[in-house]
Image (cartoon, grey):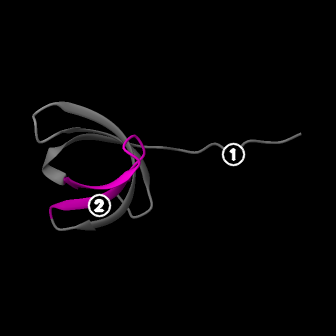
Amino acid sequence: MQRNQFLNMMYIAKDGNVSKRRIKIIKIVGDSFQAYCFSKQAKHTFMIESVLAVVPVFHKEREVI
């Protein structure tokens, strides 16, 4: 994970439910990281130990004709 990276992430929420989010990493500090969550449209702090999987989001450039 890197700053300004876009990711699809699955993690275990505090209530024990598995959640899927699309995020943009803002900063990583110790055992947590802050990210902008696109589904909640807000900044959120995630615990690294709660992350189940992350997949980078690749943007394809579109060609205008």
Residue where numbered disc 2 is placed: 34
Q: Amino acid at mark 2?
A: Gln
Hey, which residue is sitting farthest right in the picture?
65
Query: Residue at point 42% right, 45% down?
Result: 38
Q: Amino acid at mark 1?
A: Glu
Give the magenta range: 31-47
Q: Which x, y percent locates residue 65? A: 89, 39
Local SS, label 2: strand
- Residue 61's disc number: 1
User: What is the C-alpha distance between the residues marked 1 and 2?
Assistant: 27 Å
- Say whether residue 45 is left or right of residue 43: left
Hey, which residue is sitting farthest front in the picture?
41
Local SS, label 1: loop
> Magenta span has 40?
yes
Magenta-colored segment: predominant secondary structure: strand
- Say whether residue 59 is left or right of residue 23: right
Hey, which residue is sitting farthest top in the picture?
17
Q: Judge by depth and name the residue closer to the eye, 20 or 48.
A: 20
Q: Quadrant of residue 15?
A: top left
Q: Is residue 4 above or below residue 46?
A: below
Q: Which x, y percent locates residue 24? A: 41, 54
* Precedes in sequence: disc 1 or disc 2: 2
